[in-house]
Structure formats: C-alpha cells, structure tokens
Amino acid sequence: MFSRKTVKLLCGLAGGSAVLVFADSRGYLGEPREESRRSRWSRFPVLQAAQPAWTPGSHTPTPTGHAWDFNWDKRDPSALSNGKKKESSTEDPSSEQDNSKPKATRNILLIRHSQYNLSGTTDKERILTPLGREQAEFTGQRLAALGLKYDVLIHSSMARATETAQIISKYLPGVDLVSCDMLREGAPIQPVPPVTHWKPDAVYHEDGARIEAAFRRYIHRADPKQKEDSYEIIVCHANVIRYFVCRALQFPPEGWLRMGLNNGSITWITIRPSGRVALRTLGDSGFMPVDKVTRT
C-alpha cells in the first residue's frame, strides 16, 4: 500500500536540481529486497526537476580584477633593465639580463604568536599563558620535523611574539634570532566590510604605513645573488600575517579581516624567481592536539 511507502527527496546543489525516489518495505518501487540491493543505484526510476538550459557562458566564471602583476615587488629583471644604458658596446645584453635574474625560490613561514595574557595592560604584561607556551612548543616541534634548512628566525619585538620565537628557537639550533619593530601588531588598513565590534586604537594610516613597509622588506622574490632556495621564519601577529597574504596574492588588502588564524599556526608563502606567489598553507595548526587549539 502507498501508506507503507517512503518518499525520499534528494536535492542536488549543482544547478538547483532535485530528484524524487520512491521506496517501500519490499525495496525500490516494489522490487524484492535482494533484487533491490543489487540494483539500487542503477535501476531506480527518477523524476528530475526541470533545470535551466545549460550553456558554456552561463556556467563559466568571469575574471574579476586585474591580471597578475609580475613586477609587484619592483624586482622584475625585465622591468629593471628597461632604460639602462649599456656601459660597453661589446657587452652581451642577454648575458647581462641573465645575471640579473633571480634563480632561487624564497619560502616564508609566517607564525602567529601563541596564546597570551589578554588582561595585561602593557606589552610587557601580555606574556604567553601556560597553554600559549605549550602551543609554541608544538610549533617548534613541527618546524623541526619538516626537516628544512632555515636561514633565519625573525620576530616582532612585542613580548608575546618574542617569547613564542624564543621557545621555537630551542628546536632550531643554529638559526639566528632577529627582532624587528616593523612587525609589531597594528591595523593595516580599514577592513571591508566594516566591523563595529572591533575598533583599533591605532590609527590606520600610521600602522598601515609601517606594516606595508614590513611587507616590502620581507615579502619579495630572491636576490639574483641568492643561489639556493631559502626558508625564513617570521613570528608576528594575525593582522600582519593576513595583510601580507592579501598583498602577496594580489587580493584586495582590505579583505584581510575575513580570515582567521589560530595561535601558533603556520602560514607558508612561496615566491618563485619569476615573481609567481603560492600560498602553501594558511593558518595550519593541525599538528596540535585539538584541545590545545585557540584563537585569541
């Protein structure tokens, strides 16, 4: 009887389609139960809702924004060589340009500081919590486990970033620690869409200029003199990292606040000699136990 039948509605997200499948206690549409199991996915009748006519144009995304700027860091060899006068008529122009081309890939691992004391009134009081120190240990272990040859460990001069970097450095013997004021936390640019619950004390045009200067200093393709690929660690802050990611990928920088980063997480940016940029990981904290993960 129809009262014993079950009606299942399966909605497909693609194209807004929907299908109706009728089943009862004996199987699909009255089949014996064993026969139903054998042919369940190949034989049941389907009533499919009407879909709009498919055309290539209606399903092909259209590019929004500008083409990739290969001279985004102002270090494109072809751009640098334009307008230069030849010093010697015997000099081979192709050889000169080849010598000025970067050959190595830069890998920049951006680490967000660990959880810290939010009740501190000054930077010196905003030190890591016991959990924050555990998080830094996990991050240090993860970086060591990657087996990479790190060139330098740069960190913001703020207390929470400095302490995080010091704990990480225990797992990376021989890697120099360098402190930098330019990497301090701040408000890089007014976010879009605007938010009402977050009103930074810092002035956008002051912090923004400093953070942009830090981006230009640390995020760029390799120098032509660099022969081998490099791996550099930068321990800093969520706002700084999110802004760096937007700028490096040539996304609208005002979208930085649309991303979230866990404490002690790893964001990995790769910059090729050609100027191409890839984001290998964003806010990776999967190496931490789930009960140790925070975002404060």
Image (cartoon, rainbow, N blue to C red):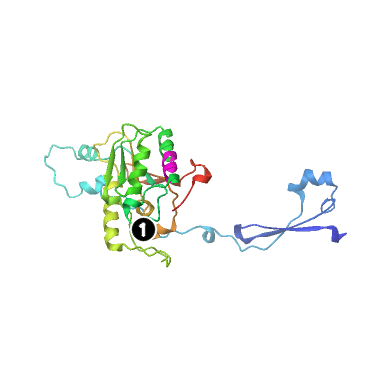
Q: In terms of secondary structure, what is the magenta stretch mainly?
A: helix
- The N terminus: image quadrant: bottom right
Please state which of residues 254 and 161 is positioned toward the viewer in this rendering: 161
Q: Position of residue 217 (x, y in %)?
A: 26, 48
Using the rendered image of the protein, determine whether residue 71 is visible from the camera's viewpoint: no
At horizontal 53% and vertical 61% (from top left) the residue drawn is 58
Using the rendered image of the protein, determine whether residue 38 is visible from the camera's viewpoint: yes
Assess whether residue 236 is covered by the magenta stretch.
no
Left or right, 108 with respect to 138, comes to left
Q: How many labels were placed on the picture?
A: 1
Q: Position of residue 173 (x, y in %)?
A: 34, 32
Q: Position of residue 238 (x, y in %)?
A: 39, 52
Toward the right, the furthest residue is 1
Q: Circle 1: is it few (<14), some (14-19), or many (20+) Cα within 10 Å?
A: many
Left or right, 88 with respect to 41, comes to left
At horizontal 35% and vertical 44% (from top left) the residue drawn is 163
Assess whether residue 133 is covered by the magenta stretch.
yes
Please state which of residues 263 and 118 is positioned toward the viewer in this rendering: 118
Q: Position of residue 106 (x, y in %)?
A: 33, 40
- Mark 1 is on which residue type? Pro
Q: Quadrant of residue 100?
A: top left
Highlighted magenta segment, given as a residue range: 132-138
- In terms of secondary structure, where does tag 1 sit? helix
Q: Which residue is mark 1?
A: 253
At horizontal 32% and vertical 55% (from top left) the residue drawn is 122
Left or right, 180 with respect to 130, comes to left
Toward the bottom, the furthest residue is 196
Left or right, 263 with respect to 41, comes to left
Does residue 33 lie above or below 206 as drawn?
above
Q: Quadrant of residue 223?
A: top left
Please state which of residues 192 and 10 is positioned toward the viewer in this rendering: 192
